[in-house]
Every structure is written in C-alpha cells, then in structure tokens.
C-alpha cells in the first residue's frame, strides 16, 4: 500500500508537470518513496544526506533545466529544513516540489518521535499543499491530478504522504504490477508534443497601460534586471527603439552588448541627481525583468512614488511598496508597444556617466589589490562562455560595478528572490554543467553558511569544471560602511584551506592580483576552491575615493 501510494503521487507529477529529476534525502519514513524511485531508472536522482542544501541544489537544477524538480525527505525536522529554499523559490517564482514523508495522522500532537505538524509548515510560501494517506487516496488524487495538469509552474507546492507500518514488506515492490504501465506512459509523454501551459499573449489593456506610461514619460530611465534567454533579443530591440538611458544588471545578459553601450548607464550611485544635473530629470522608471539590485530601488522607495515606476516582469513582485506590476511574458508585451519619440536628448547624461566610468577604471588600476579590483580581474580572466554565479550582499554589487564591459558571453546568475546568503553554493552546484566552466563568487560568510554544499560535487557529471571562489575579507564587510560596531561584520581570521581538504578539492589562494601564470595554473584543475584575500587598506582607500567621485559631481 505504501509503495502504491508513492507511485500514484510520482505518476501524476511526472506525467502532468514534467518532473524528470528528484533530489532524494533517504530516511526510514520515506523509504517507500526512496526504494520506488531507485527502481525507476528513467528518472534522474541526486542523493543528499542533508535536506537544507538538497533543496537549494534543487533550485539550481530548476534554473538550469527550466523544469520543476522534486526534493524528497523523511519526516520531522527534515521537513523543516526545506523552508529556507521554499521561501527563496516563492520569491523567485520557481516550481520546487516538496515531497515529505510523515507518520500516520493519529500521531499528530502526541509528541511521538519524528512526528510533528508537517501540514501547513510552509505556510503561504507554497501554492497548494496536499496531505495523502491510505484512507483518502482516491479522492485526493483526483483533485491533485486536476491541479497538476493546469499548474503554471510559478510557485512551490507541497505533497505530504503518511506511511503506515510496516514501511516496506518483505519483497515489497511495484515493479511486477503497475510500474511497467507507468514506464510506458512516461515514454509516450516524453515523445508527445508539448501543448500545455502556453502562456497567452498580453491582453490589449495591459499593453495599453505600458503604452500610456511611455507616452506620458518624457525622460524615462530603464532598468533591466535578470532576463530569460528568450527575452534578451526582444528587450535588445526595444531598447534600441526607445533610445532612453538604461542601467543593465549583469544578470540581464545585455550589460556587455557593444550595440547597447551608447544607451548604457554604468554607474549606479545617485542616478537621479546626476540625470537632473545634466538636463535630463527622470520622470519615470521602467523596470524590465527581475527586481533590481542597485541602490536606486531604495531611493525610489524613500521618494514614495514621486517618480512613477512600472515593472514589466514574469514575476508578481515590484520590490517597492507602491509600484504597479505588468506580469506576463516580457517579449510579446514590449513587442506590442509603439515608441513615438526616441529619447535622444539624454546624451549629456550618458556622456557624463561615461566620464565617471573612466574615473572608476582609474581607481581600479590605482588600487589593484582592492576587493573591487579583484572582481574586475576575475571578470577579465574567467574564460568566455562560462557560468558565473555571484553571491548576495557585496559580490553581486561589486560584479555590476567593476566587471569588464567586454562581451564574453558569460552567463551571470544569482539568487535574488529574498536576497539572502542561504544555500548559495548548493544552488550554484545545481546549475553546473560539463559543457562549460562553472564559477561561483561568494563572500566568506556566505561560504560558511553552506559548508556542506560541496557534497553535491559527487552528484555532478564527470568532467564538470567547478571553481568556488571565496572572497575572504574576514567578515561581512558590507556592514562596515553602515554600522560603526564591529559586531555587525562578525570578524574572523578563518582560512578555507582545510575546508577544501575536507572535501578533497584543489586549493589556491591569491593575496596579490593574479598574473597570466596564475590563471594558467588553474586550467588543469577540475574542482577548485580559490580563496581571494583582498588588501583591507587598499579596499578602504578605493571606497573612500569612490565616494569622492560623487561629492565632486
């Protein structure tokens, strides 16, 4: 009965939502699920001992494959370990499927071992939650099937399954009964053309709202956040038609495009003040893609809606307390909009910004061992076509500030749903593929948050080159410029060499700017921890002079 119930749930997920990968954390209570999945060789499984990292790894797999991924746990605190990744999935609009095994319902509230209130544990961070048991399997399965067949794959869901003792009977297997039929159905589903869940074209009234916004905005600023690959060309065309100044974040995939440099605003500080000083007072901000990282978004919130903001995004979040969101497919929406007056009068603003960018380049050369200069060096040295995953807090901001503008076809990714530092290495490892080099650049505290993350390396395909770059500035230095108390930075003197040895990874440490020989020495290494230790004095001097740029302007 336990395996039959497991197969019923797995069947609906695989056939109706397209799940092909399961991240499995084995335990006694979920043994019916684990043994069943081991029998289905056609499904890909990743095996983890720790649920928190496993769930973040699943998020990386979703972003890499574009398909929903399920994580399977046992009962009790194991289910609780999935909450951080579920929160991230909710705000990143990722279809994470949580499958938690549970003891029978009669144990709830009794304090029995491995028994807790798992139903509703993920609260509003899942779109729907189901609680299966043998008593009501048929009715719930019909409801579950109906939902999964129309699920738009933009929110996590939770499936809780109660298993009775004995968990597995001697010789328990479904392989001789219903499993062959399921395998046949799965093979047919994979060969059938995909017609479900095609998103509709934007409604005329939605296009009209965007059209009105652009018509009444004489001096717009466009901010482009993370984009899907399929949206990059339509956004490229729209930017060229509009002719307005644009701030491209690295995740957009358009930051380094040579044909867009004449529209590009490079410097993120004091954009509104600088624009007004050059005769281009910004009277509207159009955001395309994900919620931006740059400081402007906080400045707009402080202004409380004085400057109108419109968000065009596939996610339902504006990142502001007041701004409307036009949610849907980006490409057809911006493709329908007519541009009546290209904003060519922004040239003085863009020219002034480019002068500041030249001064920034001078600072990077003047302080070559500063943290920002290391980011510039990394952006120049990382091979063309690599995946570059930048961690939250300082790394994502310093990459946008200091990375090269040369087009290298780097695929820059990040986790920006909640902007947290949880599970960053595991998410990155879920994205890694053997067809390219895979680089993660994270801070020291971020690495400490996910010390068990390298377990996932054993689950990757052979020949997958991974580089875990840890920028070790001895604490959370993003807080050093915000609060005078040193406790906010969690200062330390920890080295990551022993951590690399623990996971049998190659280890290299840079304390001076890398030379061509330093880069060459990395070529033969497959799995690497690269510890980068910037000079604290040069970093402080860089930021002091960086601040003076704005005071002079």
Image: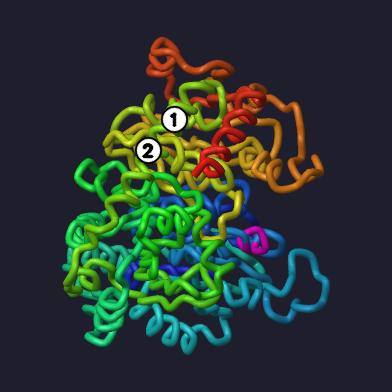
Q: Quadrant of residue 134?
A: bottom right
Q: Earlier in the sequence, mark 1 or mark 2?
A: 2
Residue, disc 1: 376
Q: Residue at x 26, y 65 (%)?
A: 184
Which residue appears farthest toward the top when viewing the image?
Answer: 517
Q: Which residues are magenta?
A: 79-83
Residue behind mark 2: 355
Q: Nearer the viewer, residue 64 or 302?
A: 302
Q: Is residue 40 visible?
A: no
- Which residue is at a point 60% across and 49% down the rendered structure image? 421
For the point 25% across and 58% down, the residue is 345
Q: Secondary structure at mark 1?
A: helix
Residue 432: image location, x then y, percent: 40, 41
Q: Is residue 31 above or below residue 208?
A: above
Task: Say whether residue 219 is left or right of residue 367.
Answer: left
Residue 186 can be seen, yes or no: yes
Identify whether 192 is placed above or below 499: below
Q: Is residue 376 above or below residue 133?
A: above
Q: x, y percentage for residue 378?
A: 44, 28
Q: Residue at x 65, y 70 (%)?
A: 102
Disc 1 to disc 2: CB gap under 8 Å: no
Left or right of 10 on screen, residue 478: right
Name the one closer to the observer, 77 or 442. Answer: 442
Q: Residues within 10 Å of mark 1 (few under 14, many from 20)?
A: many
Q: Residue furthest bottom?
A: 139
**Image check: 55 left or right of 177?**
right
Percent x, y of residue 428: 47, 44
Q: Residues within 10 Å of mark 2 (few under 14, many from 20)?
A: few
């Amino acid at each position: 009965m336990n395996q039959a119930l497991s197969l019923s749930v797995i069947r609906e997920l695989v056939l109706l939502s397209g799940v092909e990968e399961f991240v499995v954390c084995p335990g006694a209570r979920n043994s019916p699920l684990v043994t069943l999945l081991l029998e289905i060789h056609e499904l890909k499984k990743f095996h983890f001992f720790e649920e928190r990292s496993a769930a973040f790894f699943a998020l990386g797999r979703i972003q890499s494959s574009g398909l929903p991924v399920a994580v399977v746990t046992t009962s009790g605190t194991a289910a609780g370990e999935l909450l951080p990744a579920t929160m991230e999935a909710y705000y990143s609009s990722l279809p994470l499927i949580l499958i938690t095994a549970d003891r029978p319902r009669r144990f709830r509230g009794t304090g029995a071992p491995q028994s807790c209130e798992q139903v509703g544990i993920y609260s509003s961070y899942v779109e729907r939650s189901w609680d299966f048991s043998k008593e009501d399997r048929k009715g719930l399965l019909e409801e579950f099937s109906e939902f999964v067949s129309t699920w738009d794959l933009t929110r996590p869901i939770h499936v809780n399954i109660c298993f009775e003792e004995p968990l597995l009977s001697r010789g328990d297997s479904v392989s001789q009964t219903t499993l062959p039929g399921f395998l046949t159905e799965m093979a047919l589903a994979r060969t059938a053309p995909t017609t479900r869940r095609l998103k509709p074209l934007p409604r005329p009234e939605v296009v009209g709202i965007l059209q009105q916004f652009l018509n009444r905005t004489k001096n717009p600023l466009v901010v482009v956040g993370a984009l899907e690959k399929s949206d990059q060309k339509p956004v490229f065309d729209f930017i060229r038609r509009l002719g307005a100044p644009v701030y491209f974040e690295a995740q957009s995939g358009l930051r380094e495009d040579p044909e867009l440099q004449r529209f590009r605003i490079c410097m993120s500080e004091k954009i509104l003040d600088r624009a007004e000083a050059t005769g281009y007072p910004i009277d509207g901000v159009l955001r395309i893609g994900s919620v931006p990282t740059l400081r402007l978004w906080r400045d707009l919130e402080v202004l409380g809606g004085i400057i109108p903001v419109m968000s065009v995004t596939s996610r339902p979040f504006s990142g502001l307390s007041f701004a409307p969101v036009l949610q849907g497919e980006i490409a057809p929406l911006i493709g329908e909009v007519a541009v009546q007056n290209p904003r060519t009068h922004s040239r003085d603003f863009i020219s002034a910004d480019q002068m500041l960018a030249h001064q920034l380049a001078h600072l990077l050369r003047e302080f070559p061992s500063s943290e920002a200069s290391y980011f510039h060096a990394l952006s120049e040295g990382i091979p063309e076509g690599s995946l570059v995953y930048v961690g939250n807090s300082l790394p994502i901001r310093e990459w946008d500030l200091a990375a090269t503008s040369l087009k290298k076809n780097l695929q820059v990714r990040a986790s920006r749903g909640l902007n947290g530092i949880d599970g960053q290495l595991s998410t990155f490892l879920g994205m890694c593929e053997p067809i390219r080099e895979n680089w993660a650049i994270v801070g020291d505290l971020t690495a400490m948050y996910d010390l068990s993350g390298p377990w996932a390396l054993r689950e990757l395909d052979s020949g997958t080159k991974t580089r875990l770059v840890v920028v070790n500035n001895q604490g959370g230095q993003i807080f050093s410029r915000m609060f005078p108390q040193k406790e906010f930075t969690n200062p330390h003197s920890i080295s990551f060499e022993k951590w690399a040895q623990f996971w049998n990874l190659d280890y290299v440490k840079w304390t001076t700017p890398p030379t061509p020989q330093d880069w060459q020495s990395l070529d033969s290494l497959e799995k690497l921890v690269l510890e980068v230790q910037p000079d604290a004095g040069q970093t402080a001097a860089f930021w002091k002079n960086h601040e003076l740029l704005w005071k002079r302007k």
